[in-house]
Amino acid sequence: MTKLAASIIKELIILLRDRVGLAILFIMPMILIFVMTLIQDSAFRTLNEKGIPVVFVNNDNDSLGIEIGKGLRSSELCTVYDSIDGKPATAESAKQAVANGKFLVGIVIPKNATGAIRSNVTQLVETTMSADSMEQKNAGTDSVNITIFIDPITKKSFIASVTASLREFISAIKTKIMFRTFSDQIAELIPGKKKSTSAAFDQTQIISYSEVYASKSIGEIVPNAVQHNVPAWTIFAMFFIVMPLSGSIMKEKTEGSIFRLHTMPSSYLLLINGKIIVYVLVCMIQFALMLSVGMIFLPMLGLPALTIGHSMAGVLLIALATAFAATGYGVMVGTLASTEQQGAIMGALTILLLSALGGIWVPTYVMPQMMRNISAFSPLNWSLEGFYELFLRGGTVGSVIIYAVKLMLFFVFTMLVASVVNRMRKRV
């Protein structure tokens, strides 16, 4: 126990002497989270397809135009504007604004659009209700041409979403007009029924739907830049500890202190335990700082606050398992490398590769299937999936235990590799 305490004190002294390196360990990841979250915020909004800027020109000023305007404004899909630079939007100014990139989509409802629909529906109903309805008659077609201006950079999924919403609104208006026209015809046959049937229809919603995210959490936690970037870059920072840790091991090799340590009547793992404990503690401090960034500082910039779910025990379990996995990897790299340059290059490149494959840079759910299959072998992905389970799906300790076990097995594997390599080199 005395030997372990001495090893821990030695590592703390070495670590605290390098104040610049220590500051980088804690400050660099915080800056990284700020920058990457701000950069990717609009990208995640695009993935969620919300808040599409739309300029709306209502030349109809009747049921169709009013209902379409209401529907677009009540939907999270669009952010609707009816003026441009403080002036009421027109078809010409809307087209120009979309061409200049001020809006992704422009919608123009023509004059008398509702009247045209009402005229054609009336003709159709009269044809249906007439005694000679079996004869072929021209019921007319809707002569409404809604113009949609589209910015060339707009995703096709955006256009499909907007046009689908327009069709929904138009269909609802046509149904209302048709029902009321039928009511007028019926009222001529059964006096007194018009008012009651029309009122009943207005108060009836035949089909309704709701969007519910498949999460066990209370409420609806929508994946956003904060929910992804805070855990992702925290994991990256924890694994990037491979640089100072492997550098510390390499320094002991070059200075010859490792040979003096080997002369002590203690196993290699006991000697290295001091490093593991100190750097696991550093990783946990990093984790606490990153959580504070997501929960306190990012909301100050107008970004959503980080939601950590309802299982703090699960969060601590995954964080601790990640810290051990990162520390074990640093020990393995430091043991395998022969020079400081070799350790720095090996550590940096492998962490960058594992983070890219693990979904740190780009979320795995936007990767092609082949890359998603490969990412399943990255320890950074195990940690990220564990945090996703807790932050987004409302998971508990039981639902993330598999990821914690994988990370701890990775830690055991790296320590075994480091021990075997160290024994082989001692024999030489």
Image (tube, rainbow, N blue to C red):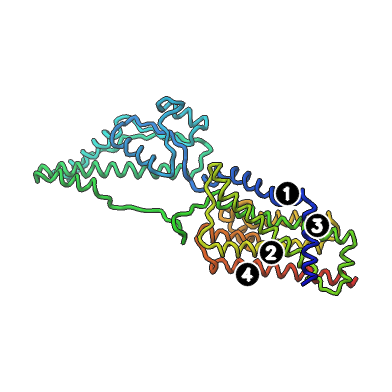
Q: Earlier in the sequence, mark 3 or mark 2?
A: 3
Is 99 left, or right, of 21 in this rendering?
left
Q: Amino acid at mark 3?
A: Ile
Q: Marks 2/4: CA distance?
A: 10 Å
* Percent x, y of residue 218: 44, 58
Residue 325: which disc? 2
| Camera-side residue of 284 and 206 | 284
In this view, the mark in front (1 or 2): 1
Labelled pair 1, 2 in contact (Cβ < 8 Å): no
Residue 10: which disc? none
| Camera-side residue of 310 and 121 | 310
Q: Secondary structure at mark 3?
A: helix
Residue 14: which disc? 3
Is 341 left, or right, of 415 in this rendering?
right
Q: Count neighbours of disc 3 (C-alpha within 10 A) and say few if under 14, some if 14 to 19, many if 20 or more.
A: few
Task: Answer whether residue 387 is visible to the viewer in this image.
Answer: yes
Is 77 left, or right, of 31 in this rendering?
left
* Percent x, y of residue 312: 55, 62
In this view, the mark in front (3 or 1): 3
The structure residue drawn at horizontal position 61% and vertical position 63%, both measured from the top left corner, is 318
Q: Which residue is mark 1?
A: 24
